[in-house]
Image (cartoon, rainbow, N blue to C red):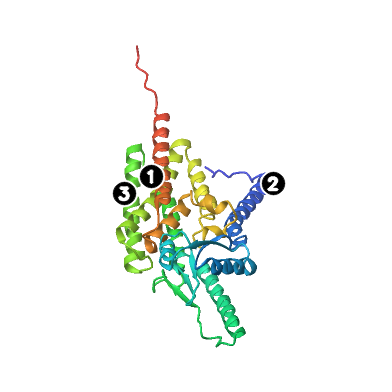
Amino acid sequence: MSARVDPPTHWARSLAIAVGAAVAVTLIVLAFLWPVATASAKNIQLAVVGDAASVTQVEDGLAENADGVFAPTTYDSRDAAIDAIERREVYGAIVTGAQPEVVVATAAGPAVATALRGVAQGLQAQVSAQLAAVGQNPLAVTVTVTDVVPLVDADPNGAGIVAIGFPLVLGGLVGGILISLLVTGVARRITALVVYAVVAGTAVTLIAHTWFGILPGDALPLAAGVTLAMLGTASFIVGLNALIGPPGIAVGAVTTMLIGNPLSAASMPVQFLAAPWGGVGQFFVPGASATLIRDLSYFPAADTTQPWLVLAAWALVGVVLSAIGHWRNREVVHVAE
């Protein structure tokens, strides 16, 4: 018996597939590069401490030399400004007075800390010029720079806390796809999701927190955050697969990788992305998980209500979709009369 040979693909279909694949790759590249290419520093929350005249002078200087980059807010004291930094309400502070100081938090964003160090240099030049104009030693007053929330020694450039975001996204995708394809039954799928997320989340936390030390902070909240991040993506994919079948896996992957991940602001402050996309990205799993892990690691005083709720909502949506898909696809049993 001769083997069956499929006829050659029609030329029109071959060309259509080639063009379609090229368009898909172009969209993928655009999705990942667009946020980076259009990113710019703007509306960075900044605390300013001092009397009314000094604050006005600082604000005028920022408007003249860095128009639109910073959004200054006046605080009564240095302690109040530092408290705001630790709650992630502002990225840094300028303290005026006899001992001028620029306070940064590198862990909140190395790019912002670098920009604020540049502001400190500008302030130093201004102070020195003022002293020289009245015949005093231009180096009599030094503008100090204080990093109140530095990055850990194991991750001095912040590359590690940024890199951890991709394993969380990929882990959620892999878990969701495997459970969708290999596990049947809504109760078994949900149980498999929870077990997978807990085991994977614990393992990732042990590697990043305990072994490599790139994630400081308390291990238990970190493990819970990583677990919920993976559960959110995996549950959503399993739910879509239960609702609409295999195409649901593709929809879930596209939603996570081509929409949520590029808008996550994992490698830059949310304000760097073109409005309103930075804020929108915080309502997807990658953005919420990136914010949550950074806050749990470096800013325990920050309000993490939103990212916790966002991740829990995605996980719950997946469970609901799984249940709806299960009941919709149940066969009706006809009893013979």
Query: Within 10 Å of the Cα at label 2, are there few (<14), some (14-19), or many (20+) other Cα atoms?
Result: few
Tag 1: amino acid: Leu
Give the foreground label among 1 and 2: 1
Quarter of the image for residue 319 reads: top left
Q: Quadrant of the C terminus?
A: top left
Tag 2: amino acid: Trp
Q: Does the residue at mark 3 contact the one at mark 2 (Cβ under 8 Å)?
A: no
Residue 69 numbered tag: none
- Residue 135 drawn at (x, y percent): 59, 87
Q: Residue furthest top?
A: 337
Q: Residue furthest right?
A: 12
**Residue at the disc numbered 3:** 195
User: Residue at (54%, 52%) from the top-left corner?
Assistant: 258
Q: Does the residue at mark 1 contact the one at mark 3 (Cβ under 8 Å)?
A: no
Judged left or right of residue 318, residue 210 is left
Q: Relative to the observer, which residue lies in front, 71 or 34? A: 71
Q: Which SS class for mark 3?
A: helix
Q: Which SS class for mark 1?
A: helix
State the separation of the CA atoms marked 1 and 3: 15 Å
Q: Does the residue at mark 1 contact the one at mark 2 (Cβ under 8 Å)?
A: no
**Residue at the disc numbered 2:** 11
Query: Within 10 Å of the Cα at label 3, are there few (<14), some (14-19), or many (20+) other Cα atoms?
Result: some
Tag 3: amino acid: Val
Residue 17 shows in the view: yes
Judged left or right of residue 177, residue 198 is left
In this rendering, the answer to whether 36 lies above or below 183 is below
Q: Which SS class for mark 2?
A: helix
State the separation of the CA atoms marked 1 and 2: 37 Å
Residue 182 numbered tag: 1
User: Residue at (32%, 63%) from the top-left corner?
Assistant: 206
Q: Relative to the observer, which residue lies in front, 123 or 255? A: 123
In this rendering, the answer to whether 167 lies above or below 136 is above
